[in-house]
């Protein structure tokens, strides 16, 4: 298993003002890439700055977790943006976070869309193209983190950006290698052992067992972990430990 | 009058979504510095990008017109921010605009607070210090545009930033060299001739007649013009023409 | 032409804070029903109260122009709301406006969805049903104003609410009696004479000529007029005058 | 101790969208009056409706916890509102909650300002008068809950509204009977026993020991309990039990 390497990413800074959601400090000791909310679905300026400072201190790569402008819906409702407006709002969020990251001694290294925008960018070429164009216009050295096979990763690659596919330790996969939708039973794996086993297998074999039993290949450079449920941080720690025990090197996919 | 030089600044991009307020394109043919709204009192991302592109095309310097977070009140209501929160929100706005400016081929060159924040920063050292600290942390090469004698300009200077005082062609001055508050009669000069005469005198003599009749010195490197009232753009054009006729060079106070 | 009667409705109060869009005072002298924005796509509390007071003074019926929560997009972007959330936000807007209307001496008499919600409620039974359920829960005496043949009007009727179909004086119709989409050429009628003629024909004959030439029946109890473009108020006045000259009684479809 | 009676109030529904703050269901089994957030500092429509339904089911009186429009600052930053704008925004919030309460089978019975508005209304007659005028215009049968000696309670009384003073079980008092500001040491009582003892004494004796040792009278018809800190609900339960053990009847100050 020499040479096997993986990045661990999680959503961070998803509070707003008085409200908190993610256990930012604890997660920053586990993950190697931080998807920092940029203010449109969550994330106020002070939280963004604080998370960036902690990420820099911990050697964690900073990514812009951009979203539709939808605080009330936490960015989980698909919206029909005109591509130009979407590109401009992505730029706004990306630049705002990059400024706070630079003041904290770091830089934004990648972008990952949040929630409904993430899903929409899987299949909608106009929105995915707008996101890729915004990243390209801002800094062609940035990576884009997203779903394998998504329109976003394909268009990001075509725009000359590094496209980084991710997998999920705690989500069930179809035989086609896509996620079982959350609306279906069994979409989310329960039981820490199953999650840990899938994480290790994803990284060391590049494959999982689909819900229908078949072995399916899933190529990923990063594993997405969740930090917004009870026990999530503890589970993330155990995933990381299991990967280490399996000889996997856990490191950011870009220099932090 | 050889060598006399002045900058003309105006607030731009003060629409939001469907709404418009300022005649951006017309004003950009008159002023040399554009105070671009950054989204907190006005200014959506697409408007910001469009104004930046037009400013770059016209050789107009781009400034960040930062504000309290108050769309409903247009940033005109004083708010008791904690200094740290204010600094972080100023950074967020400044960085967002700078990103859109860079994509448009330019850069943010200075910052000017908007509305209630402008006034509060005249006297409140905690808020003024927070604004100065944010600018300093982002880029010590940026200038700060504000009121002569304000806490903001003093603290910006102490932070090593260039502090640029401005004057108003259309506002009445007290014998102390401060603006007559808008709540008092006669605060705003009426009649294009009076405004034009005060503009020329401010620049060529560094002085105006106070409402009480005394001559009072007002040292400014920029004149603030308004673009949100009927006839405002036409008046701005006449002010610029009169300055030219008086031998004054109209140019940005920083390289655009 | 004895006994022919029509309501004229228009969107009002579509400013927000410092911004204005609609010529509220002028339109209130022309229309008989006012679709008042409720704060989610436009409409601050002071504007709502002011428009309600003027509507009461002018005998104009007050309607709640409810929307998705989307100030930046002016409610023109379709959003995937969960039905329960949509119903609750419709109730919130409806009740807020009703409170301001009551303080002004009136009451909300009907509801009309705005923008993308209006269009979505034409075909999406879950969202249309949520809107109808919210109105029903608030006050079963309220009417719902919408597009003929829409899911909303059908479900409102099934819920026991009065369903009021509207037509457009300035929009082209297909042979099926639906509006030509705005994305197609010729969707909006140009020329005051054509608009006025279509208005009169819609009311007196219950029909229009489709873009493809056929005569098509359009049954409406209200005509929607627009007030957000130059000359719109003048055109609205001419439409009303032409209806009067044709013997049509212009009056609210509900008691104001 | 026959006949002694007190209301217990707490802030509820202070989440927004995905975020939660208060343990609404648990608190509703303890308090007799629920100060429900109305959307301006916290409180989305679905949360408001859900809390109202639970309050109705539990016989808890519903109050409108109105605020400045400041989600990012949780309504804790003083703002310079024009009185007319403040009155209109209070009406908007009050009416929105009342609509959701009515759909849930109840009614809003009182109003209590939140955070910075609460404090400002203690001393600022213009803002306090605007709040009282809004309540009076909406329904003169509503009560206003606030601080003893505040401008708000005085002006509410002068407007013919019932003015209900509250006290705090967990806050230290000055010899003047006012709260020790949170910025000072010892402002918040620590230790459940001290809090419980002060609660019982406030209700049974109408007095507390000031921080400087003197006995000071504090007349209150309601005790404010907090539900946003760990252990808060448990402490609230113990306060209620201790009041019961002391022979105090715990009941809403208005019919729910």
Image (cartoon, coloured by chain):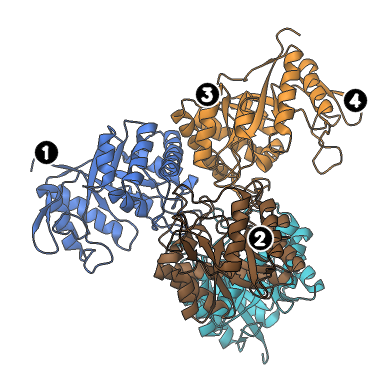
Chain colours: A orange, B blue, C cyan, D brown
Cα separation, mark 3 vs mark 2, equals 40 Å
Q: Nearer the viewer, mark 2 or mark 4?
A: 2
Q: Secondary structure at mark 2?
A: helix
Q: Secondary structure at mark 1?
A: loop
- Label 3: few (<14), some or many (≥20) within 10 Å? few
Same-chain status of marks 1 and 4: no
Q: Nearer the viewer, mark 1 or mark 4?
A: 4
Q: Which residue is mark 1?
A: B3
Cα separation, mark 1 vs mark 4, equals 81 Å
- Determine which of the numbered discs, if any, sits on residue D45 in the image: 2
| Residue at the (63%, 75%) spot, across then down | C223
Pinpoint the chain carrying mark 2. D
- Determine which of the numbered discs, if any, sits on residue A57 in the image: 3
Q: Secondary structure at mark 4?
A: loop
Cα separation, mark 2 vs mark 4, equals 45 Å
Above or below residue B48? Residue C82 is: below
- Determine which of the numbered discs, if any, sits on residue A214 in the image: 4
The quarter of the rendered structure image containing the N terminus of chain D is: bottom right
């Amino acid at each position: 298993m020499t040479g096997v390497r993986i990045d661990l990413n999680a959503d961070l800074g998803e509070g707003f003002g008085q409200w908190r959601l993610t256990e930012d400090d604890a997660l920053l000791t586990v993950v190697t890439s931080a998807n920092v909310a940029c203010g449109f679905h969550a994330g106020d300026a002070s939280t963004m700055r604080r998370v960036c400072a902690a990420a820099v201190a911990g050697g964690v790569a900073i990514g812009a977790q951009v979203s539709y402008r939808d605080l009330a819906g936490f960015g989980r409702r698909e919206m029909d943006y005109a591509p130009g407006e979407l590109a401009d709002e992505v730029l706004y969020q990306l630049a705002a976070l990059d400024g706070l990251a630079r003041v904290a001694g770091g830089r934004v290294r990648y972008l990952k869309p949040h929630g409904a925008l993430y899903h929409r960018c899987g299949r909608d070429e106009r929105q995915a193209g707008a996101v890729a164009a915004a990243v390209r216009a801002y800094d062609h050295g940035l990576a884009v983190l997203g779903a394998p096979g998504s329109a976003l990763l394909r268009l990001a690659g075509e725009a000359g950006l590094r496209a980084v596919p991710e997998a999920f330790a705690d989500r069930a996969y179809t035989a086609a290698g896509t996620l079982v939708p959350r609306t279906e039973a069994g979409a989310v794996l329960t039981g820490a052992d199953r999650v840990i086993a899938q994480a290790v297998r994803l990284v060391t074999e590049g494959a999982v067992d689909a819900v229908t039993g078949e072995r399916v290949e899933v190529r990923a450079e990063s594993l997405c972990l969740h930090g917004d449920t009870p026990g999530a941080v503890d589970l993330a720690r155990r995933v990381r430990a299991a990967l280490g025990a399996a000889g996997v090197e856990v490191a950011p996919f870009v220099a932090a």
